[in-house]
Amino acid sequence: MATDLSGFGAGVPDKQRLAAQRAARPVARPGTPGAAANAPLTPGRFLRDPLAVSLTGAWVVPPAVLVASLSRHMDLWLGVLLLIGLVAAAVLTGFRTFAHVFMFAAVIRPLLDLTAGERDGGGVSATELFGIAILGAMSVWLWLNRDDLVRRLWFSLPLALISLVLCWVLAAAGSMAPVSGAVAALRVATGVAAYLVVDLLLVTHRMTLRQVVGLVVTTSIVPLAYPLLGLAGVTVTHVKDDVTALKSVFYLSNQFAFFLVPLAILGTSWALWTRGRTRLLASAWTIVVLVELMLSQTRGAWAAAALGMFIVATVYDRRYALVAMVGGVLVAVFVPEVNARLLDLIPDPDDPRTQSSLAWRFDQWASLLPDLRTSPVLGGGPDFSLLHTGKEPHNDYLKALIETGVLGLVLYLWVVGSMAYVAWSALTRSLERYDRLTAGAVAGGGSHTARGHGPSVMLPATCAAIAGYVTSMALASFGDNLIDNVTYLWSTLPLLAMAQRVRTAGPDEDLDL
């Protein structure tokens, strides 16, 4: 039986079986949990829904004012307006359309980095106001859904994430700079809340895996296209380490680079597994991502992307892993921008005053370790390293130890281990499901014998990318600061919620990807 592989949702041969599964789902009454999931969202239905229109107004107007102002410091009343609007949206929509609240938040969040800047006094930035507002909205929605939420909290990953947030709050409360520590804890809490929201939306069928994938693609459009405005004189780069680095809508090129890492890994996996038009689109998207990643001049992100792409190539076919290795070596040797940045890791023998970034990291780590003695259990508090040395430690594991103590390091290792377990378990489940459906297709008269030519290719392709991404970022954390990076949290944790959904799904459950 031929299988149409065009489009992200293609590749399921037994369409009659899936249609029967969907038809068997109980249709919820309007206003009850799950009602919105059974009714397809169309522009007409959206505009006729007063709650959806109110939601859009509550979201669009305040952020539009913030972005239009492009001011580094916002008046208090403007922040209160944004907070009230978002919390009101969460209360009004409740069970029905909160998925759209979160999706809008994920798309607009990178754009608010256009308002970021160096602090030159008191005040609250647009990004911080946004973090407070969306955390408030998500908290209200989670409370409305607390009965469903409690049942999800006993898995290892959410339990580890919540424990880490509590540790950060305790460390901030006992630090010498509690306000700065509270802001850092807020960033982590917002990312954890995003995970809980996506996980709950997925498990209650108010968001689909396909919507999560679509959200990833949609979120990337503006940051990938924004550098084109550089041709019109808009600032899209900055200078770091005497090189010009692409930063797009973000304040720093490092943030942009780590925003691109999961996109590069996902695009590579989709290009390997799919065929036809989907492969062409995925390949073109991945090329754009890789070019802009290279122009970001961020070596840690390069290494993370390279490792993740190597992993997805190995999962797909080990022969492709060799191709990936050879391609990486050729890029490192023959692309001048990459070659020059890699050579910076080696001290210049003709200039003994210069110090490689690798040597600088070792010196920074050695200088921070003695500070642990002052508070070994809870550390010096979030942002302790930055406040005392003017630099981040550039090592998440050391950062957790210095700023949140031994307890914080143990909890962070628990989080990293849980992420890896969820991601790789989801990959195993998706491959088992794929092989089972492939065997069923062959038994039914089909001829699917190789990966990439069978049913449901997008599910194992996406899970392979998540596993590769989580593994690469766990290693990249030895040389970068990602633990409280909003860009990293908003990219990583929703993908982990997707993996958790795959891992815990029943063998015959339709995952709709």
Image (tube, rainbow, N blue to C red):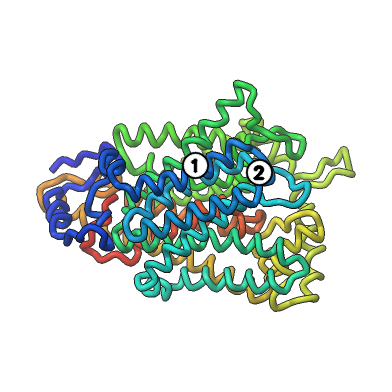
Q: Residue furthest front?
A: 77
Quadrant into which the N terminus falls: top left
Amino acid type of the residue tagged 2 in the rendering = Ala
Tag of residue 202:
none
| x and y percentages locating residue 443 in the rendered image | 12, 53
| x and y percentages locating residue 103 in the rendered image | 42, 49
Asked whether residue 298 is in view, the answer is: no
| Residue 502 relative to residue 226: left or right | left
| Residue 367 relative to residue 474: left or right | right
| Residue 214 relative to residue 370: left or right | left
Of label 2 and label 1, which has the lower sequence position? 1
Classify 295 as above or below 37.
Answer: above
Q: Residue at x 31, y 53 (%)?
A: 208
Along the line of sight, the residue nearer the viewer: 234 or 425 = 234
- Circle 2: is it few (<14), some (14-19), or many (20+) Cα within 10 Å? many
Q: Residue furthest bottom?
A: 377
Tag of residue 116:
2
Q: Which residue is mark 1?
A: 61
Please, what secondary structure does the residue beneath circle 2 have? loop
Number of marks in the image?
2
The image quarter containing residue 374 is bottom right
Classify 82 as above or below 25.
Answer: above
Along the line of sight, the residue nearer the viewer: 416 or 510 = 510
Q: Residue at x 22, y 50 (%)?
A: 39
| x and y percentages locating residue 457 in the rendered image | 29, 47
The CA distance from mark 2 to mark 1 is: 19 Å
Q: Residue at x 31, y 41 (%)?
A: 47
Amino acid type of the residue tagged 1 in the rendering = Val
